[in-house]
Amino acid sequence: MKYMAAVLLLVAAMSAQNAPSTTKGRHLDIPAISRDANGSIVSIVMSDKDGHPIAQGSGFLISKNGQVVTNYHVIRNGRSAVIKFPDGTFFAVDGLLVSDEDHDVAIIKMHGNGFKALTLGDSDQLKVGEEVVAIGNPLSLASTVSNGIVSAIRTVEAEGGKFLQITAPISPGSSGGPLFNMAGKVVGITTSHLVGGQNLNFAIPINDVKPIIGLCVSAIAVPFPDEPEPVTKEQTTGPSLAETLQWMVRSSAHASDTSFKSASCCPTYDGYFHILKEDNSCHNFEILTVVTFVDRDKNSATAMLTHVFNLEDMDPANIEQEHGAITVNTTNNQDRVTLEIDNAIDVDHLISHQLISKKVLHQGHADFYVDDDNNYRNRLAEAIKRAVILCGGKPSTF
């Protein structure tokens, strides 16, 4: 029996090695595949709102008018992108055409025309043991060529469906690059490697991507998703959400009546704010601001401005400090903002005297004026950021 088992294993191995090729009639060598693909494989550099590079990946052209295929995770974070060719030329990116987060695929539009596109193959014809070639930009090393075989074809529903397991090496920065068969046609998108594994790399079959590519015909470029970076272990260490919210509530109460004051124009005003939170969840977070105005004739009026929003709808990257205020932006246009004013001072009066911004009366934006204690203001801003991160905050669309 042991002998028969050994024979069966040997036969299986020989069958894999002699699997029929999908490249009948045309078989290129690796230098020829690399040469033919030159000018069609690019590096994608994503930048944040300040123009600072934050991510780099690979992509490849599928049309003369600048449609570039890559992984969704390459363009997930960041607000803008540029395309870099191996010869050092750069092109701006108009935006995102279509994407499928589940399959980790995105197609972006590069500004310009007359580009060289790659030819797509048929990934359904791939056989285990067949030779493949990957070209990408690992760690920004342009046009890096590696080869290997298809070691398995796997289905992982939790990760989006079918994957090609390959032995061609993949490193950070390779994501989004093309995987070629030996006819020089694209049969996959290199997407990931298994950390801790020995040469365990994966690609998305190109046939799973073709329906997404078909949507580009009528697509118009839109802004990038600009999602926040995933929460790291370091960000989640320290005070819990409940502890953070309790500190914010207690601290804001202690700051009452000393939060902000102005006598730079008439009318003068002073007031305070309270953070109101009944429980320790991420929902219905309230900040109540009370402002008392006094005009030249010593007439006074009080305005109460209440913001109600969810912490998971706030953008941790857009919690800023300027001129003694903490500014936040939210993504949910259902945020409730109410304004109650007594006596004769109305909303138009407050806006005309720049005491309350027009933005603050609309969903998605709020300014909270804090006292001159810079240390307290810094701590409060950091506490809000931490609470937002722990609640899974996402980028603002406002």
Image: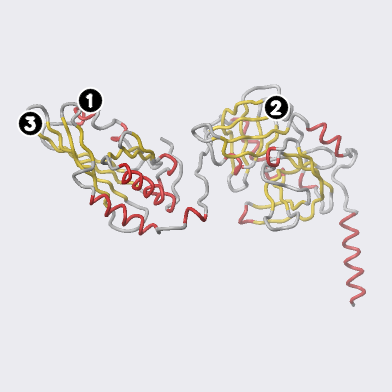
The mark nearer the N terminus, 3 or 1, is: 3
Quadrant (top left/top right/bottom left/bottom right) for the N terminus: bottom right
Q: SS class of the residue under badge 2? A: loop
Pointer 1 with pointer 2, Cβ within 8 A: no
Q: Which residue is mark 1?
A: 352
Query: Disc 3 on helix, strand or loop?
Result: loop
Residue 118 pos. (x, y %): 75, 33
* Residue under the point 28% across and 48% down: 286
Q: Quadrant of residue 60?
A: top right
- Which amino acid, mark 1? Ser
Residue bearing mark 3: 298
Closest to the camera, between mark 3 and mark 1, is: 3
Q: Mark 2 = which residue?
A: 88
Local packing at callout 3 (Cα closer than 10 Å; few below 14, some 14-19, many 20+) is few
Judge by depth and name the residue closer to the eye, 277 or 362.
277
Locate residue 181, reporting x and y percent: 81, 42
Circle 3: residue type = Lys
The crowding category of the residue bearing disc 1, from other C-alpha atoms within 10 Å (few below 14, some 14 to 19, many at least 20), is few
N-terminal label among 1 and 2: 2
Image location of residue 256, percent across then percent down: 21, 47
Dividing the image into 4 quarters, which one contains the C terminus?
Answer: top left
From mark 3 to mark 2, how far is it between C-alphas?
67 Å
User: Marks 3 and 1: CB-CB under 8 Å?
Assistant: no
Query: Which amino acid lies under the numbered mark 2 shown in the image of this protein?
Result: Gly
Dot 3 or dot 2, earlier in sequence: 2
Q: Secondary structure at mark 1?
A: helix
